[in-house]
Amino acid sequence: MCGILGFLGQESLVNHHSFEQSLNQIIHRGPDDFGIEKFTFHSGESWLGFRRLSILDLSMAGHQPMKYEHFSMVFNGEVYNYQEIKSELLKVGYHFISDGDTEVILKAFHFWGIEAVQRFNGMFAIALLDSLSGKLFLIRDRMGIKPLYYYWKDHNLVFSSEVGPLLKFDWVNRDIDPSSLYTYFVHGYVPAPKTVFKYIKSLEPGKFAVIENNELRTETYWQLTKIVENRPLPISNFEEAKYQLDQLLHSSVQYRMISDVPLGAFLSGGIDSSLVTAIMQKQSSTPINTFTIGFEDGDYNEAGFAKEVSKHLGTNHFEAILSLKTAEEELQKMVRQMDMPFGDSSLLPTLMLSQITKEKVTVALSGDGGDELFCGYKLYDQATRLQSFKTIASGVLPFRNYLTNQKWVRDHYKYLGILFSDSDSNIINSGSLAASVFIKNMIKGAPNYSNSYFDTNARHSANIQEANMILNMKSYLPDDVLKKVDLATMAHSLEARVPILDYRIVEFSFRLPHKFKCDHGNKKRILKEVLYQYVPQKMMDRPKKGFSVPVFKWLHHDLNHLVEHYCSHQFISKQALFDQSVLDNLKTVFNKQPNNYFTNGLMWNFIVFQMWYEKNLM
């Protein structure tokens, strides 16, 4: 795993010193080696930079930028099936001086052109410079496991694995995008292609960008919705489907155990991480290392489950505990690692988990993706209930009023009324609308913005649960879950690999009848049946908690001084981003109602944003 940086444009904007300074912003992504090269290009000057975390072929033969004839490339990630691709290229006359995947990728592009990306099974962010055609390609893997950001303005391009290096160039515009800020406060992240910055974009998963003749365009080479629309007939036999899934998982894990450095696994004790760990251990001749994080608060601590699974599988297990005493220190560390504001509080324990893991290994396999692919989240059940409620309510009474009489909806939104004046009371019947209006009023200059991205991208299936799964695969998974893992692991120079998100498993999942994934509330049915071949069912039969963190308790008690500081008139006036009166109202409700679902989540996102803003933009 590594970090890349590149520039294409006006010669006076970049020199070796400024480029190296920017590249050093991501030294944590690649502490083992670095390379910088300048190229004369058709449309101006080009620089490519690379920070290396050595995983495959630890020799200097894997040094980047790597060149072959008229191609030059920097690459972050892993292509796991490089040996098969290499065999194909050897047959047509190519020769190799290295044992890693970088040279294979470069020569694959030389032979097949941009279509080579269709052959890659892995996680990657690639920059490919073709001096013959005058094109620069930026390419991101299908699932968005590896990030790639770019700034394109006035025919000048700078791109990187993180946003931080882009901000080191003083000609890069840092204006905050109010509509993206709104999205961040609602969801805790900003979905690609947007970022919180108006002019900095995130290349979307399964896409590549082409810069040619002073123009930038993006093209799609893999799209989940197309896979779903064109899928073949489903696999109707459950036992056959289970066998095929087990075989795919073994192949995927085997690929991801290819390494020239020590590797291990994140083990939470849940279904996904336990399954990945079980298959790893089955394929290893010695006990693998497994790692987990627990919490001092017993309501959130699931470390005991991980220990039980580890004992059954025979792994070498390591555990650390995140306590309230270290919470603020860990929160400060978390914000220091953020290239953009990120509201998922599970980043905290993931950072700590990555730290203890790096002490023993350089590569860790994780179980991410199981919930999205096999219908594991509670919200999928709620989506079905919403659909049922709408049908029942039709012709009986207004759906909105009916819905707000449901306890599970009221529990989420019953405290919202105090946030609004009497003139706004008509919108209280819809909690999500109320939240949206409140947040829009909080942000100065926020447009009349809706969740159009989330609305339009969910309509790819008649099954409401599958529609939500597709939506999560397109937004929540890459822009929250995978972003979190990349941030946390790279902060500690640790490579994370995600076997369940092998694109072959993704495509296989959407060939399955939905009842194989969720059958009368039995979520992740087929995945659990595969797991029970390795771990007893009685060991796994317990409620799903997720990687929850008691941050709301912390903000109401020992960390409440952060609320006072970042909501203060003095701090808000320096930013000129927020409406002070609306924030005062938020703070009042937050302090008075510690169990308010809406204000707790919004306050956490706000505090994280303020800490990030103070560090990066003040």
Image: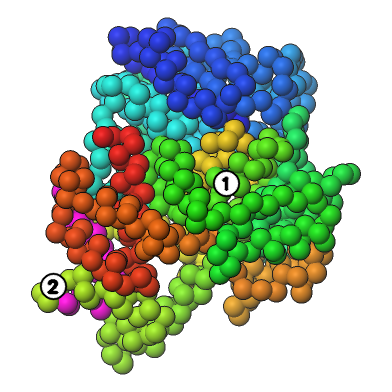
Q: Is residue 309 left or right of residue 364?
A: right
Pair 2/1: label in front: 1
Q: Is residue 229 above or below residue 94?
A: below
Image x and y of residue 606, in percent: 31, 53
In this orientation, does residue 137 appear?
Answer: no
Which quadrant would the N terminus be assigned to in this image?
Answer: top right
Name the N-terminal-most of marks 2 and 1. Answer: 1
User: Residue 259 appears at what percent x and percent y?
Assistant: 74, 33
Looking at the image, which residue is at 42% across and 9% down? 16
Residue 434 in magenta stretch: yes
Residue on which disc 1 sits: 352
Residue placed most toward the observer, 590 or 527:
590
Q: Quadrant of the C terminus?
A: top left
In percent of width and height, residue 435 lies at: 27, 66
Q: Specify few, some or many for label 1: CA neighbours under 10 Å numbering under 14, 14-19, or 20 or more.
A: many
Q: Is residue 17 left or right of residue 349?
A: left
Question: Main SS type for the magenta part?
Answer: helix
**Residue indicated by mark 2:** 421
**Residue lying at the far top of the rendered structure:** 40
Which portion, as a residue range, is magenta? 425-445
Give how far apart the Cα atoms at labels 2 and 1 are: 43 Å
Is 221 drawn above or below residue 608 in the view shown? above
